[in-house]
Image (cartoon, rainbow, N blue to C red):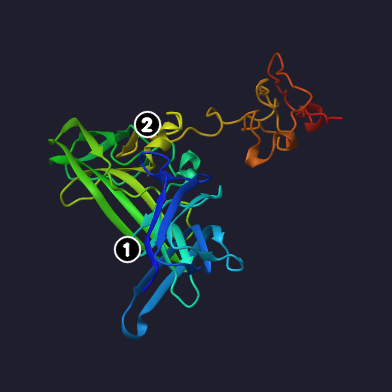
Amino acid sequence: MSPIKDFTLIYEALNKEDVFTNGDTVTGVFTFTLTKETEVKSLLVKLKGDANVHWSEGSGDRRRTHRDHRRYFKVKEYFIKEDAKDNVLSEGHHRFEFSLQIPQQDMPSSFKGIHGKIVYKLQAKLSRKWHMASGVEKELKFASKSLLQPGQMKCPQAGSVSKDVGVFSKGEVQMSATMNRKACSPGETVSISAKINNSSSKKVKAKFSLEQRIVYRAHASRRVVGHSLCKMSGDTIGPSSEGTASCQLKIPEDIVLTLHNCEIISVTYTIKVYVDISFSIDPEVVFPVAIVPSRFLTQQPDADFGPYPAAAVGAPGYSDFPAPAFPVGPYPVPPPAYGYPAPGPSQHANIASGYNNPFPPQSAPYGFSSAAYPPPSVQHQAPTAPTVLQHGEEPPSYMSIFPPQQ
């Protein structure tokens, strides 16, 4: 019968969410009672973080198992080492305090899924010779500090827009949508609005959904699992009419945090706004959103995780296309020969081709630096009157118009 009784492990929570992050120190105490004097091989407390994935596919002889593992860190604090001389503990109650620091390195947040998990464990362990080790362990909730960096959250400055359009015999449907957050925490409410122009002959209804996408990777294989966590419906828009559908979508309390910095597991979220149209392609707008702890959001200014600008879907108009990289105007004209005016002072003459440079002075063509295209030191001014050639008169030579530069 084991002489070790009442082995307990207690750690101190740093916040009301009981979440740790990079660089935090885990402090606590573990206690146990010995019913008699006991020789101990080692006594320690350790903290570690690991990620594992595992799944099988196929059947019979074609069944294959995929697995992979990542060890992020392991730190230990010894109270009795294996080579210690005085390794005998007396009968009675024993209490040991510990303090272990989580490394500052980039590590993913805690996660548990059907094909994998990322777990951070705190474990106290007492080992004896010729006996099974005794101890207790607890899992810690860990949130990665990399979620504080908006550039790492995969949240662009605008919603990703699907260009699918529901087209009918009597018209089409167009929609634009806005969302007030790029990042939110579990339990928060997100405001979404969709403006719909229904020029079709059918009724349409706006719908909103929170989508989760989990990807498990093991070497060259991967398994993708998608979930629709919650759905809501807006108002119905009648035929040949316009309307606005709004939604207050609440993020589930038990939702898993966004996970992007693990090589074998990733978790991403999107909020999809779409128009449900029977027997047709549904127009939709997709907003990537990051799920982070609430205390992380309070540590960042609102500008970093502010609202998305309006995103639109529907038949593109002229205003939907981007402006050209250079000024739009009349076609460039030849040099000032045969009665044509010379290039104005805002444009430089292209000596090699004899035509005006279509690129503005502040940008160089084809991605080269402006140093490779220095401006000409001489500006050619337009003549006061057009040059008129008389019968039999030869036109002026090219070198007389554009003399070589020194």
From the top left corner, tell me how far across and down residue 401 is, in percent.
Answer: 78, 27
Q: Quadrant of the N terminus?
A: bottom left
From the top left corner, tell me how far across and down residue 287 is, in percent.
Answer: 35, 41
Callout 1, which amino acid?
Answer: Ile
Task: Determine which residue is flagged by label 1.
Answer: 114
The quarter of the picture where residue 368 lies is: top right
From the top left corner, tell me how far across and down residue 392 is, in percent.
Answer: 75, 28
Compared with 76, 358 (above or below) is above
Q: Which label's residue is closer to the chain start, 2 or 1?
A: 1
From the top left corner, tell me how far across and down residue 81 is, in percent.
Answer: 58, 64
Q: Nearer the viewer, residue 47 or 29?
A: 29
Residue drawn 66% across and 25% down? 347
Label annotation for residue 342: none
Measure how far apart labels 2 and 1 are at the Cα level.
Answer: 33 Å
Is residue 192 in view from this perspective? yes
Compared with 81, 129 (above or below) is below
Q: Residues within 10 Å of mark 1 (few under 14, many from 20)?
A: few
Kind of element beneath mark 2 = loop
Q: Nearer the viewer, residue 50 or 337?
A: 50
Q: Which marked residue is nearer to the observer: mark 2 or mark 1?
A: 1
Q: Nearer the viewer, residue 118 or 201?
A: 118
Residue drawn 84% across and 30% down? 405
Residue drawn 19% across and 42% down? 232
Kind of element beneath mark 1 = loop
Compared with 364, 88 (above or below) is below
Q: Residue furthest right?
A: 406
Callout 2, which amino acid?
Answer: Pro
Task: Determine which residue is flagged by label 2.
Answer: 307
